[in-house]
């Protein structure tokens, strides 16, 4: 069976559900779709097909990348928020999975507000669905974001290292790069842990050195830490954890500081906010950037909390690649849809 | 004038507005579109055309079937909920009907919350519209649902009776079958009466024996009962009313138990709920199913209130056809759009 | 550079950003697209392209005209209301402009609730966007509405004067016509001033005699009055201001009475409402219509507040062109999209 055949019909819920060659194919396809889009070459691989986009939580980038993406592929997305659908009052995951599989060709879900809810909901829908279920962010992973992140790192470092994207594997391009995945302060609602968790699980696989930094109370799910540990062991990378932002940033090629919530306080937003305030100095500013390599890139999944998570100087500065990263959400989600649906 | 010509441009508000041959044509077209969809044969009969979907009330199945359906037909649906449009603040049915007729090609409306409001609203929009108005559920009828129900019964019994769908009329296939349309308990908001009303008006026309069961307070609109009576007289079927679920189920080929509100209490949800509680034993369980024929099919328009209207054992059991029924919502709404728009 | 080239990629924020030949081209293109639509001739000029429609405020006509319009052009619109997107919680205009420019092909925004907010927001998004930004109504102008209004006046008077739309310029058709742009009473939230402001700025350019009437407290933005004055001077038209509805209507060929808010009271809806009540007699009724020319046309952007702004007799009468005006919203927004995107 060819690689393409192994992807057709598959759910895309966590990157760890996929082999390295499968992820490589997703990245190559993203590159290809990006070129076609820029060149104005039609690529209607999903003509008249429907994907259902369910948002239990608010979103801008995710919705717009999927909806514009399927349009470019010739299909159509239903944007469905929990407020306007019966999912909020009593539709079971089983009914959702079975019925939508009969109406359309793919089901994408965002459900990330509380730990231990989103991922299991998606897996239950997927269990009953005959069509692929795509995770647009859950409590555990945000595999559309992290794939776009990896695509971005790959593009930047292939160029810097004089490698051709069409000829070099991702592992060849990113191997040995150090990424700092760090907590940062934000005075907002408890944000999901899925981005840092997804990053440590994905970047370790391709041989990157991953250092995770967070205040002691802001631990990630043990299961994801273990997965990162295992992937690092397999790829020969290092996976380290520290309580110091500076230490994580030291000599990093890539820095990715962002806020997330305390796993024990997701249902107590007030306490969560109070706790965060102890760590107001966890901000990514020009001073801190000096700890990283001179040409290190600054990443963020957006929207960033300016003046809290990061200063304008850094996010708007020459090291920031946030808009390329955001753009790559489009190309990667198109690859995911085109290959699984 | 051919049958197809009589449908072009027509409003689809109640099934009783249509002749038996017209309904037969709608069912045949649904079959045809179902085959084409399953075979992946393109059927862009409404290329670049627009239908406006207005939802005064929440919905999942109806919206998704129409929106995916028009996509498969090559067109596009506007999903419009009352909250985000000016219809909520002051747009008249006349303005809506005239203007949308100039922008697009069809107008579908769901407006089912209160008796005597939805149907008259639709008819007023239709009076001013040059394009077909389609009823996605009102207080009187749910003609998209009941057409899908009839399609499902027809499929099941054609197969059981060894008849070909392409060669046998619906009347030949379903004549003499007994359907039990029954009230069932649910501790929820007062649900519209349109499904049972639509069922008794449609199934009697094709010669089915219809028994309606409900507690004494849960009467249907007199006008719909009279219509059912007349249709039964014309087709030679029987239309009976009882206060006993068991009696209705006795020897039935099809059972369709679901909750609806008390006509006098739609504006008093609390009283409605209290009244319902007297009839908690109106549940469709395995014991009750034994009253029906051994191979009787269980139907529900979904979402069902599990453990109240029906037990998991029944709705997930071998007699349940709820997912085929839900699927047929897609094929029938496509036929309705394709033939009227 | 040809005219078409000057429009490609341009923002459409106020009509005064465009030259008269550019506006003429937009009107001609609207005529052409209207003919094609009526004749059923496909015109997929924006195949598989995406426009993002952002609504900070409610809308029916604007959304439906854009969404149906882009469908007819072969593309797709994302309907995005502030409630369901992160724009409400912290997305900056810069992020919006840059990222959406990478995902799609145009950005349209409605943001009209408070004076001095909407226009500047749009201009900031436009500053960062590589794709055209289209104003679907702001605090200053409503250039999609006024272009449709001008198209309507042009159609009516070309026919009355025996001129061919394809052969006569707009200026030739409308020159010398008198339009009364008048305040009218409505007991509702403070409506934006953008329609009257847009009208006085656009109609003066094409040589129409414009008389603006309003109670003393309901002044328009000084900057827009000055612009109207300047355009009138250039085109040889007259621009006058009065406090009397009757005076404005005297001998008018076109009357356009509608409610708007008091510029100083947009944040005090209660006071605004109280103030309005002093002028309940500012209603367009049959008596007042007699002041205008016998064949004068009545215009309104809808929804009109019947019995307050206007009587049914007038808005439903033979002089009313409100539905043609509403229809032309479709054709003009298609021309704007087709030429800028």
Image (tube, coloured by chain):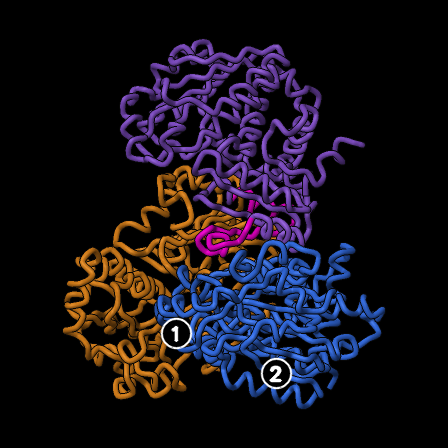
Chain colours: A orange, B purple, C blue
Viewer-closest of B301 and A152 = B301
Q: Is residue C338 left or right of residue C281?
A: right
Residue A124: percent from the left, percent from the top? 36, 42
Viewer-closest of A268 and C214 = C214
Identify the residue at image location x=45%, y=33%.
B115
Residue A183: percent from the left, percent from the top? 24, 71
Of the residues under marks 2 and 1, which one precedes in the sequence? Answer: 2
Range of magenta residues: B64-92
- Residue C298 in view of the camera: yes
Residue C163: percent from the left, percent from the top? 84, 71
Q: Report how many numbered discs are placed on residues in the image.
A: 2
Which of the 4 image quarters holds residue A136?
bottom left
Circle number at residue C265: 1
Residue B141: percent from the left, percent from the top? 53, 31
Q: Is residue C180 left or right of residue C30?
A: left
Viewer-closest of B109 and C266 = C266
Check if residue B60 falls in the magenta segment: no
Identify the residue at image location x=34%, y=86%.
A313
Viewer-closest of A51 and C149 = C149
Q: Give the secondary structure at mark 1.
A: loop
Circle number at residue C240: 2
Check the image and report above or below for A122 versus C314. Answer: above
Q: Badge 2 local density, few (<14 within 10 Å), some, or many (20+)?
A: some
Q: Chain of mark 1?
A: C
Identify the residue at image location x=75%, y=67%.
C155
Check the image and report above or below for A337 versus C97. Answer: above
């Amino acid at each position: 069976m060819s690689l393409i055949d192994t992807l057709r019909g598959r759910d895309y819920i966590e990157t760890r559900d996929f082999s390295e060659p499968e992820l490589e194919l997703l990245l190559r396809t993203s590159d290809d779709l990006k070129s076609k889009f820029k060149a104005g070459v039609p690529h209607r691989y999903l003509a008249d097909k429907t994907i259902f986009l369910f948002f239990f939580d608010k979103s801008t980038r995710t919705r717009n990348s999927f909806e514009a993406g399927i349009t470019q592929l010739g299909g159509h997305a239903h944007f469905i928020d929990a407020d306007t659908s019966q999912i909020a009052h009593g539709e079971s995951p089983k009914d959702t999975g079975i019925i939508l599989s009969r109406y359309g060709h793919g089901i994408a879900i965002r459900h990330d507000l509380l730990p231990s809810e989103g991922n299991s909901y998606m897996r239950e829908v997927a269990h009953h669905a005959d069509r692929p279920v795509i995770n647009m962010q859950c409590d555990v992973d945000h595999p559309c974001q992290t794939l776009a992140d990896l695509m971005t790192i790959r593009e930047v470092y292939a160029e810097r290292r004089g490698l051709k994207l069409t000829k070099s594997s991702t592992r060849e391009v990113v191997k040995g790069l150090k990424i700092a995945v760090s907590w940062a302060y934000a005075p907002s609602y408890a944000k999901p842990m899925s981005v840092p968790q997804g990053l440590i699980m994905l970047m370790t696989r391709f041989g990157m050195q991953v250092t995770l930094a967070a205040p002691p109370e802001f631990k990630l799910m043990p299961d994801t830490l273990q997965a990162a540990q295992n992937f690092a062991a397999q790829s020969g990378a290092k996976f380290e954890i520290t309580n110091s932002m500076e230490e994580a940033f030291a000599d990093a090629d890539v820095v990715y500081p962002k806020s997330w919530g305390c796993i024990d306080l997701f249902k107590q937003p007030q306490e969560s906010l109070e706790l965060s305030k102890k760590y107001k100095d966890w901000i990514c500013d020009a001073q801190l950037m000096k700890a990283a390599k001179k040409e290190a890139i600054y990443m963020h999944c957006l929207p960033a909390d300016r003046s809290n998570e990061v200063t304008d100087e850094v996010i708007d500065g020459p090291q920031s690649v946030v808009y390329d990263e955001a753009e790559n959400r489009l190309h990667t989600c198109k690859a995911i849809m085109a290959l699984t649906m």
